[in-house]
Amino acid sequence: MGNEKHDLMAANLLRGNTGILVLAILRTGAAHGYAIASEIAKRSENALSFKQGTLYPLLHELERDGFITSEWQIVEGERPRRVYTLTESGSKELSERLELWNSFNQAMTQVIGGTPDEQT
């Protein structure tokens, strides 16, 4: 039961921040959906994971907003797959979101990191 509560809390924290994760992964190079999800899980030591029902609509939204582009990649002997690439606009968006995230994280840490007497 405790794990269900933890999973729900983690999902609520993740909501609204999924785009920054995808953009950050694509900053290192083009990738298909499964590779993006796998890299997020790997970098977070499996603390963060995406279901297809979450990831693909997000990828479509990021593409519609011009932050990423996609194209079909066909490799002989493999199934065709859609590969996503960060655009210049997406790179700028990632920088803005990272700046916001860092400010938010700092503010949260200041509030929950201790008593006022410890912070002076």
Image (cartoon, grey):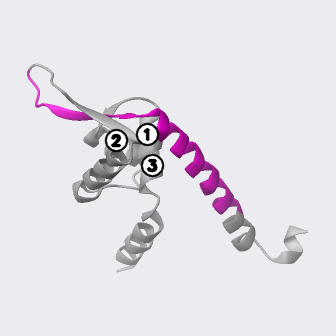
When the figure is inspected, residue 81 is found, relative to residue 40, above or below; the finding is above
Q: SS for tag 3?
A: helix
Q: SS for tag 2?
A: helix
Identify the image quadrant of the N terminus.
bottom left
Q: Is residue 105 left or right of residue 37?
A: right
Real-space Cα separation, disc 3 to disc 1, in angstroms: 6 Å
Amino acid type, callout 1: Ile
Q: Residue at x 68, y 58 (%)?
A: 103
What secondary structure do most residues of the magenta stretch adopt? Answer: helix
**Viewer-closest of 30 and 44:** 30
Instruction: Provide the residue span drawn in magenta.
Output: 77-106
Please state the horizontal and vertical placement of residue 30, each as a whole percent of the image. 36, 30
Real-space Cα separation, disc 1 to disc 2, in angstroms: 6 Å
Badge number at residue 21:
3
Please state the horizontal and vertical placement of residue 68, each as a whole percent of the image. 37, 39
Residue 44 in view (yes/no): no
Amino acid type, callout 3: Leu
Cβ atoms at labels 3 and 1 below 8 Å apart: yes
Residue placed under numbered mark 2 in the picture: 36
